[in-house]
Amino acid sequence: MSERRTLIDLPHKILETAMKAGMDSSEKSRSASYFHVDDRTVYSTINQMFEGRLEMMDVKEALRKYDWLIDYMWNAVKEDTDDVTRTVAKEYSGGYFIRILKGAEIDFPLQSCLMLSRKHMKQRIHNIIIAEEGSKARIISGCVTEKNVEGEHYGVSEFYVKKGASLNFTMIHNWDEKTFVRPRSAAIIEENASFVSNYICLQPVADLQMYPKAYCVGDNSRARFNNIIYSGGNSKISAGSLIDFTGVGSSGEIISRNIAKDSAQILAPGKLLGNNVKVKAHMECRGILLNNGASIGAVPELHARYKDVDMSHEAAIGKIADKEINYLMSRGLSRDEATSTIVRGFLDVDILGLPQNLREEVDRIVDSMIEGM
Amino acid sequence: MVEKILDVTGLGVEVEGKRIIDGVEISLDAGETYVLFGPNGSGKTSLVNSIMGLPEYKVVSGKIVYDGVDVTRKPINERAKLGMRLAFQIPPEITGVKLLDILKICAGAGHKDALSKEQMNLVEKLKMVEFLERDINRGFSGGERKRAEVLQMLFMKPKLMLLDEPDSGVDVESLKLIGTLIQDYITETKASTLIITHQGQILDYIRARKSCVFMEKIVYCHANPKEILKSIQENGYDGCLGCTKRRWGL
């Protein structure tokens, strides 16, 4: 499958696009790399330093290699959820299989890139990520379109975070105004395990709808969703998240920051389900509208079935406050500079809990977006 | 002749169509420290906010001349760049914008620049090191907010400092720290200063020879700060209202 030896051998144009979604083409600071273009896995390699501690390969190859893997297919995400899942079940061209072996602590992030490059491509992906007991890892996954490519991306991702494991997953979307996107993700989090899902989308997209779910089934399990969305043009985005707390003392947080301009529509539904005792959960949803004509909807929902839970939410939508702009102008910034400083702060990547090198890359992506504002 | 750093003449200001300042005359010589006394709600903050140029304060008459330049119609940032800087009485919280980010803005440094040793020294002196990576003013106590304001002020190296109640809601230690560092800056740079104070605590640390009482939308009385302070302490601002010896100049 993988006839190439390093990422650098891939066409320059493809790499440049991938870097916009956080890919490190030198691979030096990555523990493993995976690349899927259109309907083909073109690259999958593990950094030698990490061999024996993790696995990364195309999911079809993994299914041939491990007969037990079939039990993880369509377990967290149900096959008959909707047309998207049913289509992926029938037509998927691959996806990544990631397995962090028991007790392994992977200091360097794993990276993956799913790219649309052919016109009218209908990309169908199925990813499976297993963080075995006591393991610790970070994954950065970028999804990109080459400029002006009409296309469709359906992606199913199933996460299994075993006892005491810790998994931080950062997804960066960099689509085009002609892309139709439907991710379908769910995570099952066991006892004392922790799952963080970061989502960053700073470019317009035709239509994106997703509602990833985290099932905190284990006692004292933890889940967190951080969404950072900046959208303009005629983008239509519905990006929510749900955490279902069934483990005793499980806890979690949903943080959603949204900025809409032009005619963009963003909907941010969030749901916390307190289905056991001592559940602790919080949701924060904030939105900034840069002009009339754009829209943001925050729909926070809390449900509790036990009296011994601590659940809360806050939601706020509005324009950038004049007093914040005046304050920064009194420090010497022009009105435009003050606005972009506030936008930059609002899209605060510090909340993502990223290691320094990843943080710098996400910073770079935010910077380039703001420069073009 | 001593140059004037600030000359406000016949200033009338409206907020949302309501007159809040009515014919104010204030002038500051270069290098002078001037104290503005006044009861709560008398419009002291409105006056300095108007001088700084905050847009909700609409100047309907008179003019503001700063360092020989008529700044009456200039936006805030242009006044700031000329060296006029304001420490807010109630500064806003800004989500995700760190104290460190603001300090770099104040110093005119780039987003990725590091603080110099001298700048870091100031941060340490004001005991704000642990606040650098925190969202500006979010969850800060009264004293911490004032220390952050003064820290920014010192980073901006102003020619004219407008200090809006640097001593209100501040613990004794912060007050001493703030007062001492402001006076050091004045001594070192000969900067001009307009300080608003309600009860005058900051004057334990800052030397001023001129002051006025601002009341009823106007400058009510000019006098030596010690004199005014003594009178306020004895009779309150109500005493000023009944005073028959109102003075119009020093």
Image (tube, coloured by chain):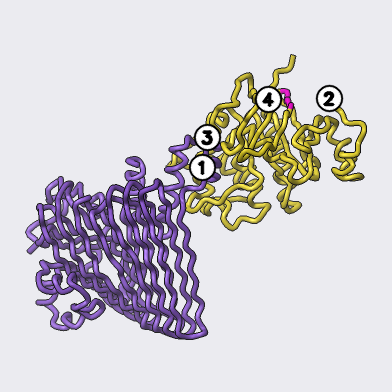
Chain colours: A purple, B yellow
Q: Is residue A44 above or below residue B149?
A: below
Q: Earlier in the sequence, mark 2 or mark 4?
A: 4
Q: Look at label 2 and name its amino acid.
A: Gly
Q: Is residue B103 above or below residue B135?
A: above
Q: Which residue is mark 1?
A: A325
Q: Residue at x 73, y 25 (%)?
A: B27
Q: Residue at x 15, y 60 (%)?
A: A36
Is residue B27 found inside the magenta-colored segment of the image?
yes
What kind of element bears circle 4? strand
Q: Chain of mark 1?
A: A
Q: Which mark is residue B6?
A: 4
Q: Which residue is mark 3?
A: A332
Q: Are marks 3 and 4 in contact (CB under 8 Å)?
A: no
Task: Locate residue A237: give its quadrant.
Answer: bottom left
Q: Residue at x 49, y 65 (%)?
A: A314
| CA gap, disc 2 and disc 4 | 16 Å
Q: Specify start and end residues of the magenta stretch as a single range.
A: B25-29
**Where's residue B76, x and y in %?**
55, 33
